[in-house]
Image (cartoon, rainbow, N blue to C red):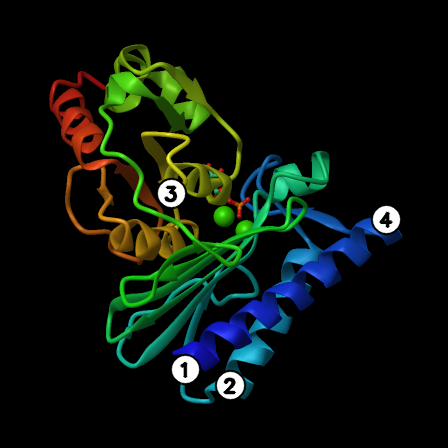
């Protein structure tokens, strides 16, 4: 496993260089996918292609699920699966030039083994899994305190908050405040570091795969919004929190009208 960890860290560094060079060259192409706010750039595609090449070099038998270039469906999770979000927070990448991440997860026989979330511009890498523990860069990351929702901040998807889906506004009011970064990876890094007590959003498998592995390793809870295991076959409502905040949120969700 150590060999794979080192390899993935090297891929992430090289991928980050590709991204930084593209930012410096300032000649990115931006396209839309399902609507005007759903962006993809040549850099998202280039980074995913680069990572896939490294992954197949490392393990030609591996299966790959990735957001771009038609790799976004996988039905067979047997063996080793790499799950890639080449740039998480593309809207931030295009409009802010920061607050985006690269995410990679490794699953084996359907079990989360390793997760990597790299905040490129801040050079913060969270990585690890149940067998090795979780690290921030090279420092061990302890499990955050099991605080309740009222004691901390909750990360939330802006549309869920606006529409009060699943009683989101009540959860927000009960907490110390809401934060919305526009990047699942950044929210998950904050949650893993104990800077948020909870996160709720609508996410695709490549948005939650790496984070879920590390959350499990730190004894935190994640699931779909009804408490069922995540399906890895499309976008779904995602919830993650400290064990106590998770229970409280489930109660708010149970009382919902929307
Ligand atoms: C998006 C971001 C955003 C989340 C969306 C994701 P992308 O990822 O993580 O925070 O709310 O659901 O799709 O498209 O920028 O990789
Ligand atoms: Ca994403
Ligand atoms: Ca993406």
Instruction: Specify whether tag 4 is near ligand 1 (CB below 8 Å).
Output: no
Q: Are marks 1 and 2 in contact (CB under 8 Å)?
A: yes
Whether ligand 3 has any atom under 8 Å from the Cβ at mark 2 is answered as no
Q: CA distance from mark 4 to mark 3?
A: 33 Å
How busy is the neighbourhood of tag 2: few (under 14 within 10 Å), some, or many (20 plus)? few
Mark 1 vs mark 3, foreground winner is: 3
According to the picture, the residue beneath numbered tag 4 turns out to be 26
Q: Earlier in the sequence, mark 1 or mark 4?
A: 4
Q: Residue furthest top?
A: 173
Mark 2–mark 3 distance (CA, rounded to whole Å): 28 Å
- The residues tagged by marks 1 and 2 sit, at their Cα atoms, a distance apart of 9 Å
Q: For mark 1, what is the residue? A: 62
Name the residue nearer the viewer: 155 or 214.
214
Identify the image quadrant of residue 14: bottom right
Q: Position of residue 202 (x, y in %)?
A: 37, 38
When the figure is inspected, residue 90 is found, relative to residue 195, above or below; the finding is: below
Q: CA distance from mark 1 to mark 3?
A: 28 Å
Q: Residues within 10 Å of mark 4 (few under 14, many from 20)?
A: few
Give how far apart the Cα atoms at labels 1 and 4 are.
34 Å
Q: Secondary structure at mark 3?
A: helix
Q: Is residue 188 above or below residue 74?
A: above
N-term-proximal mark, 1 vs 3: 1
């Amino acid at each position: 496993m150590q060999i794979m960890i080192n390899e993935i860290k090297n891929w992430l560094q090289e991928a980050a260089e590709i991204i930084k060079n593209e930012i410096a060259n300032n000649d990115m192409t931006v396209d839309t996918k399902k609507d005007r706010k759903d962006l993809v750039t040549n850099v998202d595609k280039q980074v995913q292609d680069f990572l896939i090449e490294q992954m197949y070099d490392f393990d030609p038998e591996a299966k790959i699920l990735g957001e771009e270039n038609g790799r976004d469906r996988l039905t067979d999770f047997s063996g080793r699966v790499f799950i890639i979000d080449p740039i998480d927070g593309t809207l931030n990448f295009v409009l802010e030039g920061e607050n985006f991440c690269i995410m990679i997860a490794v699953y084996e026989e359907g079990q989360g083994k390793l997760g990597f979330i790299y905040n490129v511009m801040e050079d913060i890498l969270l990585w690890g899994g149940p067998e090795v523990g979780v690290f921030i860069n090279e420092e061990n990351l302890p499990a955050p305190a099991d605080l309740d929702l009222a004691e901390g901040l909750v990360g939330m998807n802006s549309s869920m908050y606006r529409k009060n889906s699943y009683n989101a506004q009540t959860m927000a009011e009960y907490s110390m405040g809401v934060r919305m970064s526009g990047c699942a990876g950044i929210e998950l890094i904050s949650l893993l570091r104990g800077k948020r007590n909870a996160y709720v959003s609508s996410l695709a498998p490549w948005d939650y795969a790496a984070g879920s592995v590390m959350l499990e390793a730190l004894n935190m809870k994640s699931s779909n919004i009804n408490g069922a295991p995540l399906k890895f076959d499309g976008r779904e409502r995602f919830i993650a929190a400290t064990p106590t905040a998770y229970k409280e949120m489930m109660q708010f969700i149970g009382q919902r009208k929307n």
